Image: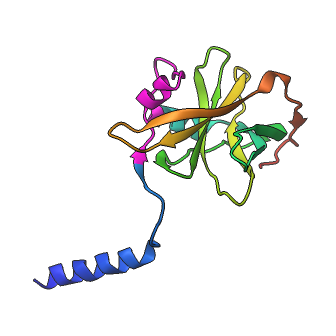
Amino acid sequence: MRMRGGLGVLLLLLSMVVPAGAEKAGESLTVAQLRRAGLSLPSYMALPELMTYQEKLPSHQALSLSWGASGTGAFTLVERKQKLAGAPGKSELSLSEVTLVVVAATCSAEVRGLALARLSSESGAFSVKLPDDSRICGVYFLRPVLKGKAPSLTQVGSINLQRAPVKPGKPGAGQ
């Protein structure tokens, strides 16, 4: 009996921490969603393996980006630094209405890295860390559509990195 009361108080306290009107969340990114968006993972890899791969890399690249806050969906590469020390790390794979899925892919649309960015309507600038992989040709920007029974991803932009200027990172410098 006493345990139930304690649990009720804990749940009440937790509900007070989460602000009212917080964005809808809880859906996890899936391989099927990426496939429906025209992207594929290497045949030997699932999303948890991709995150483990990203955690263990010796270097990463950092992309500074801006996007059209007017809703145009235009993404611009502000700066690209490669050969930065340290792994890009792994992303939480939980989707929300303010999540942007940033996918680094080969020219044949094979996923080589991904990061989830949180966008706000007040700022059109953000940065992401991705694997420093020579096979990456471009970056795709996907927004989750969480309505309906099967959440999906819609491509809202892309950048061809083969034509993008590169600013080399300083050896041993992380970003």
Q: Is residue 63 visible?
A: yes
Q: Is residue 160 above or below residue 127?
A: above
Quarter of the picture containing the N terminus is bottom left
Point 47% across, 73% down: residue: 19
How is the protein colored in the picture?
rainbow
The magenta-colored residue range is: 27-48
Task: Return the x and y of residue 166 as percentages of the image width and height.
Answer: 87, 32
Q: Quadrant of residue 62?
A: top right
Q: Is residue 83 visible?
A: no
47, 148: nearer the viewer: 148
Q: Quadrant of residue 87?
A: top right
Residue 121 part of the magenta segment? no
Q: Residue furthest top?
A: 108
Task: Return the x and y of residue 168 as percentages of the image width and height.
Answer: 88, 36
| Left or right position of 160 against 169 | left
| Left or right position of 122 against 11 | right
Residue 39 part of the magenta segment? yes
Q: Quadrant of residue 158?
A: top right
| Left or right position of 108 against 65 | left
